Image (tube, grey):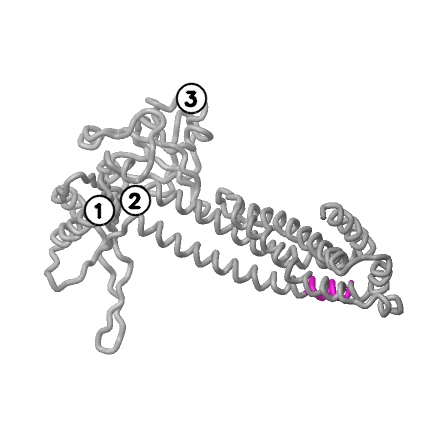
Amino acid sequence: MFKLFVENSKIAFGSIRTQLLRTILTVVIIAFGIMSLVGILSVVSSLDSMLNSKFSSMGSNTFNITQYEFVTRQRGGGEEEKINPIISYPEARFFKDKYKFPLTRSSLSFTATATAEIKFENQKTDPEIQVLGVDENFVSNSGLEVIQGRNFNSLDIQNNAYMCVVGSDFVTKGLLKDVNPIDKIISIRGAKFKVIGALKEKGSTFGNSQDLRVLIPIQVARSLYSKPSIDYTISTMVDKKEMLDEAIDQATITMRQVRKLNPVEENNFGISRSDDLVNKIAEMTGALSIAAWVIGIITIFGSSIALMNIMIVSVTDRTREIGVRKSLGATKNTIAWQFFVETLIISQLGGLLGIILGILIGYGISSALDFAFVIPWKAIMAAFGTSFIVAIVSGSYPALKASKLDPIEALRYE
């Protein structure tokens, strides 16, 4: 059996060489179908990995209280857009003082600016640094990690200490890359801050770096960046995940009390769980995966038809060759195997080319969008399996047709 397979493989490669243009076109057609499948799934896998790493780092036991953007109401036959009020500092502070659910830690924060210029000695950055006003719980609640120095403690926040924690870019390729950053003095808007810690690298999300930022105590940030209508974020972490639902219910009650809402009024704030974000991401990437499979299957179906047509033409063109082989003693199975092996080789060549092109396209798109590239092993295995199925579907009928040719009629064929 193995010798027969080797012999048929040699004959198949010989036929492929004699019909090189036809074979190349067939391989390219198959490759496009596999490429579309692997390429799209590569991007989806990279997107899924990136988004999950960003949001799941917050932990599945964290929730945020934020402002709804818009609520649409029907009034008098028309529509009126109602904007929820921002979460002001007094409200955020009142919530943190009033919310006493067991085994929870609440954090208050706000973005002071996204265009700060940071100075160190005689150097300065471009005006692209994000400055956040935070408290002592912000780092842990946000899934961040201090890898040099330390985080803020409650005394730093209470005493409004002019200290800061910097993103990893400052240490690896920024102002502090050639020095030990701890205890160095940097300038933000003319104020001097002592660096007490450096954060672990987080990377970028949709081209926005998460490592070009500086954390400073929230009251200090409020004094430096006194602007109207600052919207604060309240983040709460629950030590035990099984208590999360109850903690959210209690937080809703507390925030309604802060907002002085009566029982018939709807919430004018939003509560979002970190695992809700991960679940929504999974739904989106799942839909993209389904779309990729649909596109890939349609393209591969077209490739199968093209391959089958080309193999039928090949059987017709080689009718006399089949007659000679049968007259020399070749059995139906031998003839069928010859054409089936040829189909298998062509489909696998197309599959291999499609996988390589798909991975390259996925890598290119992931790099352009600043995603960490993830090799889609499942898609690659599926592509190999799909190309094999294409060979079976496309090669069975031509092989059966070739094996049933009458040797006498085949020898007469011109």
**Residue 60: image tag:** 2
Q: Is the residue marked by circle 1 packed among few (<14), some (14-19), or many (20+) residues within 10 Å? A: many
3 and 1 marks in contact (CB < 8 Å): no
Q: Quadrant of residue 389?
A: bottom right
Residue 381 located left or right of residue 341: left
Give the amino acid type for the residue marked by disc 1 in the picture. Answer: Leu
Position above or below: 303 against 234: below
Residue 75 located left or right of residue 322: left
Let me know if residue 247 appears in the view. yes
- Magenta highlight range: 306-314
1 and 2 marks in contact (CB < 8 Å): yes
Residue 345, percent across and down? 70, 52
Q: Earlier in the sequence, mark 1 or mark 2?
A: 2
2 and 3 marks in contact (CB < 8 Å): no
Mark toward the viewer: 3 or 1: 1
Q: Which residue is mark 3?
A: 179
Position above or below: 305 against 36: below
Residue 325 located left or right of residue 78: right
Q: Quick one: SS at disc 3?
A: loop
* Foreground residue among 145 and 59: 59
Which secondary structure type mostly characterizes the magenta part of the structure?
helix
